[in-house]
Amino acid sequence: MEGLYRRNLINALSGFKSVNLVGTQNQANQTNLALFSQIFHIGATPPLMGMIVRPDTRARHTLENIRATGYYTFNHITSDFYQKAHQTSARYTGSEFEACGLSPSYSTGHPAPYVGESLLKIGLKLEEEHRLAINGTILVIGRVVELQLPEDCVQADGFIDLEAIGSITCSGLDSYHKTERLARLSYAKPDRPLKVISLGEK
Amino acid sequence: MEGLYRRNLINALSGFKSVNLVGTQNQANQTNLALFSQIFHIGATPPLMGMIVRPDTRARHTLENIRATGYYTFNHITSDFYQKAHQTSARYTGSEFEACGLSPSYSTGHPAPYVGESLLKIGLKLEEEHRLAINGTILVIGRVVELQLPEDCVQADGFIDLEAIGSITCSGLDSYHKTERLARLSYAKPDRPLKVISLGEK
């Protein structure tokens, strides 16, 4: 298979992805913003999230900043600024915040920059790294230490309504999608039919 | 935070997830089917995919089977059978295929069972495992060795149109969503505006 064909095909295989802007800065306070779609839940207690980083790409600035400072942010993307988010993957010499028209935003409790335009902001602290022997890729694991999101998007049982926030998803290397809820389903037990907790009507 | 509230909240943080049914069997050919939403791309050359497994849950049957046989399958889910897919997470003693009304399907080139109802089937071979020190979770890495999908859903540049296939996404522990494309965007370069490759109209 030819290179681009293969990359497009294989990148689409996992399905729709958890796309986030990752905000960092170096020890001279130079900010960096990069788009990652290999981000995933690792555990709730303690609250842990994973991210896959290719060290041979521009993403290495993100990795260097995380290693240097110990802190980074995940920022959900909405349809209002997904084109700016995609543009952060261009090869800039300065900060992608400024180059792409996105606003760094800081909280007193966390040293890494958030994306002001994002409605769900997650502050993380580096906990663990694994180098994958097979292709040199790095798994970066962080602990969630701060959350910023609209309170009315969190339901009584803790479920976050990502459609109310407007978070989008991506597929392959360059395709962006909004979503429409089919249903929330009840906890599955043998010999008991599923119940729809809430339908997708908005 | 109380347990369920915390689990619902933290599980929603990564965003929309790559949900797949994972098919395995043990050395006595007893099949197993389990729902996983922590599945992600690791590399295109060689084609590698990762999956996070909690060894302290029923998911351990999946892990035991992968270790015993070396093979497993990822199967995309459509709105036609997402409730059956969710039901596989109930605690069954026999095979989830039979209990949930899903059909095992085999190819001559791969020993693990696929889900017959799935339109995008991925055959994998175990390559590498990492135990995450912080919470005992396992990262399982497999090489893609077989693909089954509708040929007309693969575009000229290798991009797979997951909406044409009807693959769905999930959020949190129990919410399922279909998608609607915003756009495919051109490769980002500094000082060059993005071009929309194709819009989402169906």
Image (cartoon, coloured by chain):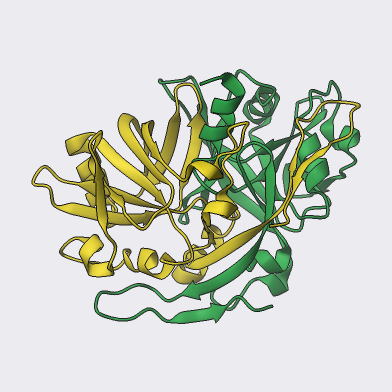
Chain colours: A yellow, B green
Point out residue A108 in the picture as x, y percentages from the top left corner: 22, 36
**Depth check: A197 or A173 in front?**
A197
- Residue B133 falls left or right of residue B51: left
In the displayed structure, A190 sits above or below A56; it is above
| Residue at image coords 49%, 65% | A79
| Residue at image coords 50%, 36% | A41
Where, by quadrant of the figure, is residue A201 drawn?
bottom right
**Depth check: A73 or A58 in front?**
A73
| Residue at image coords 67%, 51% | B122
- Residue A148 falls left or right of residue A6: left
In the displayed structure, A28 sits above or below B87; it is below
- Residue A78 falls left or right of residue A186: left
In the displayed structure, B112 sits above or below B188; it is above
Q: Identify the image quadrant of the C terminus of chain A.
A: bottom right
Can residue A50 be seen at all in this image of the molecule? yes
Where, by quadrant of the figure, is residue B182 drawn?
bottom right
In the displayed structure, B113 sits above or below A128; it is below
Can residue B158 be seen at all in this image of the molecule? no
**Depth check: A201 or B96 in front?**
A201
Residue at the front extreme of this rendering: A152
Point out residue B8 in the picture as x, y percentages from the top left corner: 59, 32
Point out residue A172 in the picture as x, y percentages from the top left corner: 52, 62
